[in-house]
Amino acid sequence: MKVLVTGGLGFIGTNFIIHVLKNYEDYSIVNLDDELVGSNHKSLADFENSNNYKFVKGNITDSVLMEKLINECDVIINFAAESHVDRSILNAKPFIDSNIIGVFTILEILKNQKKRLVHISTDEVFGSLETNSADEHFRFNPSSPYSASKASSELLINSYVSTYDIDVVITRCTNNYGPRQFLEKLIPKAIVLAAHDIPVPTYNGGKGIRDWIFVDDHCNAIMKVLHKGKKGESYNISASNEIDVLTIIKKILSIMNKDTSNYESSEDRPGHDFRYSLDSSKIRKELNWSPKVSFEEGLKTTVEWYLKNQEWWKDITDIKTLNSIQWKS
């Protein structure tokens, strides 16, 4: 099977490509990426000369290029997205272009090319939840330009499935962590700052709660959805690891044998959601998926990877990347 992966130089896309190429010998990957913020070719260096892997530089809003690539593949996995909430507050336009116009471009092509699209969305479309967990039918309530753009893409997809009978499946996942994640995200940022004995910044005293999943478990879930997911359906993916940010930071500092009080509060961003939580009963029951990696095991693996692979991140470490208030930059 030939798989077109969009955004395959990003964190989840990279790990997905590695997962597929290591576990599915009869699969080949075409990786389309525009080499924007967070892209890193080092992540896939082991496959650069593989017959089952090809990189194409380009943007999913390029309809001519996308039509050519989709015509040559069997299925599409759409990871391509601007994804950092802080940067969406600073400038929303790239998020609208990638997350809405880019999806529209793919959908228009699929009206004539009947191939499966797995669209990767986010738990943030449901907004902040005080109690309970959002299932697939929960009301959208996005609170940032990023989450609004992802919710918009889902609504657009649903309309195309209903109107044009195209084959699309949507996945929404909770906070991913693991190797090869760009340093603007909490866990890699905390690891790198701690390695330099710099206090780790926290929004709102680190009280925010996120549901954490190791990226390999997410990749397994995507493959389940690709193979067995029902056309027009959406599937929530979570590992039920709801942990507040401050606890995460302290765990990282402890694993690294650092002072567990080496963190500081920073100015909170506008519209900051307090808690995300997904109900993943559907994918567990219908597709027989479940997470395999415990949070303690996954976090230890992640810390060890960043410490052993400093060449991966050293040349992208700068003040702006590690700035705790990027929405003001």
Image (cartoon, rainbow, N blue to C red):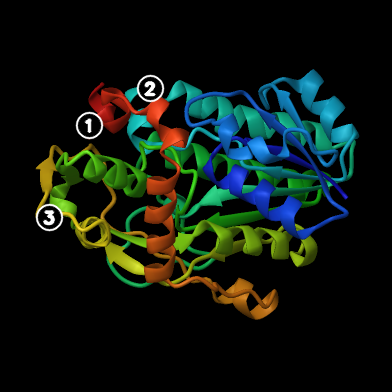
Q: Position of residue 122 (x, y in %)?
A: 50, 51
Q: Position of residue 271 (x, y in %)?
A: 26, 42
Callout 1: SS: loop
Residue at 45% from the left image edge and 66% from the top image edge: 278
Q: CA distance from mark 2 to mark 3?
A: 36 Å
Residue at 18% from the left image edge and 58% from the top image edge: 207
Please tell me whether residue 322 is drawn above or below residue 268 in the rendered image.
above
Mark earlier in primary sequence (1, 3): 3
Residue at 69% from the left image edge and 22% from the top image edge: 57
| CB atoms of marks 2 and 3 within 8 Å | no
Instruction: Single out the mark in the foreground, 1 or 3.
Output: 3
Residue placed under numbered mark 1 in the picture: 325
Name the one closer to the observer, 235 or 212. 212
The answer, for residue 283, to whether it is visible in the render is: yes
Callout 3: SS: loop
Q: Position of residue 20 (x, y in %)?
A: 73, 53
Residue placed under numbered mark 3 in the picture: 259
Q: CA distance from mark 1 to mark 2?
A: 14 Å
Q: Position of residue 144 (x, y in %)?
A: 36, 39
Q: CA distance from mark 1 to mark 3?
A: 23 Å
Please tell me whether residue 90 is drawn above or below residue 148 in the rendered image.
above
Amino acid carrying mark 2 in the image: Asn
Horizontal side of 280 relative to 158 (left or right) equals left
Name the one closer to the observer, 125 or 15. 15
Q: Which mark is residue 91?
A: 2
Horizontal side of 266 relative to 287 (left or right) equals left
Amino acid carrying mark 3 in the image: Asp
Q: Which mark is residue 52?
A: none
For residue 99, which quarter of the picture?
Answer: top right
Amino acid carrying mark 1 in the image: Ile
Callout 2: SS: loop
